[in-house]
Image (tube, grey):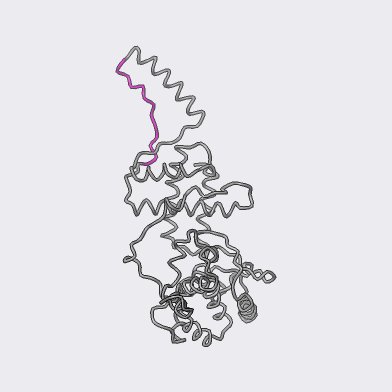
Amino acid sequence: MKKDHLKWLDMYIENCRQLNKSEHTIKNYRADLLKFLTWYESHHRANISKAKGETIGQYKDFLSKGGRVYSSLSGKEKFLGHFKKTFLSLFKRKNPTANTSLPTRLLFEQRPLAVGSRRRHISAVKNFFEFLKQSHEDKGKLFSKNPVKSKIHAIKLKEMDVTPTKNLRRDDWDKLEKMVIKPKERLIIHLLYWGGLRLSELSNLKVSDFDTKNKTIKFIRKGGYVHTLIVQKAHDIFYNLDYHLLQREVESDFIFTNKQGNQVSTKTMYNLIMRLLVQAGCRDGLTPHSFRKACATNLYIKHQDLLLVRDYLNHSDAKITQTYIDKATLHGVHREMGLTQ
């Protein structure tokens, strides 16, 4: 396999580890991407930075129908193969039963995949290209576009199959903010509620991600996206950040650590947030993701701009953003404003 392809794959896998992806998930990503890269090299001489939407369509068709992938021939191998074929054709004139076909090396055979498996493969490829796009943003036009279009990898789910995330209402937030006193815990709930961060993003935050001068946070979003966030309530967030860093007993590059100075796991962060919700007397059924839904809902109510909310949460598609806006809260606001009958 080409050195560049292996190097980029290793970079992506390392990024997945930094995002606290499970080893099982990382193993699946690596297997799916090795399959794609092997298929790509057997069909194309250029590296994957030249891949286009048509290329991804061909690979999707390959996963759907199945097929065999053979090793691509180098220039030297092609010359020797041509020479051998010519020699065997001359030999066949004397012996018509001789086999003149050239031996080929079968790399793997792909059976036709079900819809769910195909979508998982294409989703892995899309995230890989998005990571390469973000990591090469300062290197000219290399990976300037993701060849995997959203409509190719999109997964449509029946509404009945989805259990919606419960929204963190304003009264829940007021209880929580009144109860939480420690700077560390206040920083966590403010980043969730006003920043809309996911658990993995919260756990991975580093001191260097915070720009005190410009009041922005630059961090890695889900899928490897590098996002510079002009965060709401920046004064409160940076105020609690300063106090948290002054009070903590260990030095670390990470904002949230355990007693040994190691980065906290998403499980530890989840348990902490759930404990705070219970102690504050918030409604049952709320989760850390409820903060993200509240962030999206409040932003939309304030600005009435779906694309603004999409960019703030760093969604790839506004259709995803729509699912984060709590309809009950929105209807309540409309009733108060006299916009509904």
Image label count:
0
Instruction: Tell which residue pokes out farthest to the top in this image.
Output: 94
Residue 69 is at least partly visible in this image:
yes
| Quadrant assignment, res 302 | bottom right
Return the x and y of residue 161 as percentages of the image width and height: 32, 65
Q: Is residue 308 left or right of residue 172?
A: right
Instruction: Tell which residue pokes out farthest to the right in this image.
Output: 213
Indicate whether 180 appears above or below 228.
Answer: below
Front residue (pair 329, 340): 340
Front residue (pair 268, 238): 238
Residue 287 is at least partly visible in this image:
no
Kindly identify the residue that appears in the image at 48 percent across and 61 percent down: 318
Indicate whether 185 appears above or below 71.
Answer: below
Q: Is residue 13 left or right of residue 136?
A: left
Indicate whether 318 appears above or below 177.
Answer: above
Return the x and y of residue 166 as percentages of the image width and height: 41, 75
Return the x and y of residue 31 as percentages of the image width and height: 42, 51
Return the x and y of residue 36 as percentages of the image width and height: 44, 46
Question: Magenta part mainly helix, strand or loop?
Answer: loop
Kindly identify the residue that appears in the image at 35 percent across and 67 percent down: 162
Whether residue 97 is in magenta: the answer is yes
Whether residue 90 is in magenta: the answer is no
Q: Is residue 240 left or right of residue 335?
A: right
Indicate whether 195 appears above or below 284.
Answer: above
Please state the extent of the stretch shown in magenta in the rendering: 96-108
The quadrant in which the C terminus is found is bottom left
